Amino acid sequence: MTSPSTIRQKFLTHPSELGVVAVDFSGGQCKPGVDAAPNALISAGLLEQLRHDLGYDLHGDSDVHSYNDYIPKGVPDPDYRGMKNPLSVSAVTETLSSRVYAQAKEGRFVLTLGGDHSIAIGTISGMAKAIRERLAGKDIAVIWVDAHADINTPETSDSGNIHGMPVAFLTGLAKTDRKDIFGWLHTDQLISVNKLVYIGLRDVDRGEKQILRENGIRAFSMHDIDRHGIGRVMEMALAHIGSDTPIHLSFDVDALDPQWAPSTGTPVRGGLTLREGDYIAECVHETGQLIAMDLVEVNPSLEEKGASETIRAGCSLVRCALGDTLL
Ligand SMILES: NC(=[NH2+])NCCC[C@H](N)C(=O)O
Ligand SMILES: [Mn+2]
Ligand SMILES: [Mn+2]
């Protein structure tokens, strides 16, 4: 086995530097409020904790950069192949992709605070490209922690919400012939289905199940976690990725049970405990392969009584992924 810090050392030329990207965007789904999450997380002290308690130097957005400025103005954004707000989501994620790429090129860990999960189209494409350039064509692995698989194509989606489709675009399973609707994604920005692992699934659409099956995608559902325990599931998930691959962790807060994270747009009962979520983040940190994390789908305006709990849970997940709880 290569020494655990090799990947991080090779890629993160500045391991104590964080590129923070705060994305106030909600256009990948229909409920307002998820755009307020980055501010809520920052106001709760997240960045200060990373700086002060964990000793990171922060770069990038110290407050929220308005991604809504990148939505094309004065042009209608009609549904296309059933997708809602396709031009807006495409334009925002394209800009986000280049901002993430710029941070990653500096050799920094990139932490993105969403926003809805459609923003992963930008973050993961930016990381995939930066890693390929810096590590001689190497692919990144993605650990997608979520109640949902978010791998609908426009054709299999019932809702038309693009936050249910990012993985289909990122893997090239969803094709597009429109430059202005994700046609900007080039092969060097895509990920391989073989290096994708899901954890926490429990609400997967019928068409998505077929996509997972047909592509042999590794997925650990809540059923698997109940059967094997989170410890064994993490061993299996990380073994699938291997020790020589950089990891992007995309964490949807709805992977947690609504008891811990009620303020989210598509809550599903029967989820992870906060401790299980933290444990996932700790295990990925411990590999020395983690190079980027997204935290998405915190919506402070839903279930307002639970908003501070959800924000606190989100802060905890990020701190764990950045090494807080390990001795
Ligand atoms: N990122 C999320 N919370 N996604 C929920 C997706 C729900 C459903 N599968 C859909 O495609 O609409
Ligand atoms: Mn989800
Ligand atoms: Mn999601």
Image: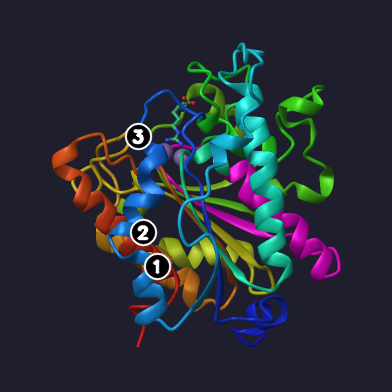
Pick the residue in front: 180 or 295.
Answer: 180
Q: Is residue 318 visible?
A: yes
Q: Earlier in the sequence, mark 3 or mark 1?
A: 3
Identify the mark at residue 42; answer none if there is no mark.
2
- Circle 1 SS class: helix
The question of residue 139 being in magenta is answered with yes
Tell me the kind of residue under disc 2: Ile
Residue linked to disc 3: 33
User: Looking at the image, which residue is at 53% across and 76% down?
Assistant: 287
Q: CA distance from mark 3 to mark 1?
A: 21 Å
Q: Residues within 10 Å of mark 3 (few under 14, many from 20)?
A: many
What is the x, y in percent for residue 132?
80, 62
Tell me the kind of residue under disc 1: Leu
Q: CB atoms at circles 3 and 2 under 8 Å apart?
A: no
- Circle 3 SS class: loop
Residue linked to disc 1: 47
User: Looking at the image, which residue is at 62% across and 50% down?
Assistant: 123
Magenta stretch in the rendered image: 120-149
The question of residue 16 being in magenta is answered with no
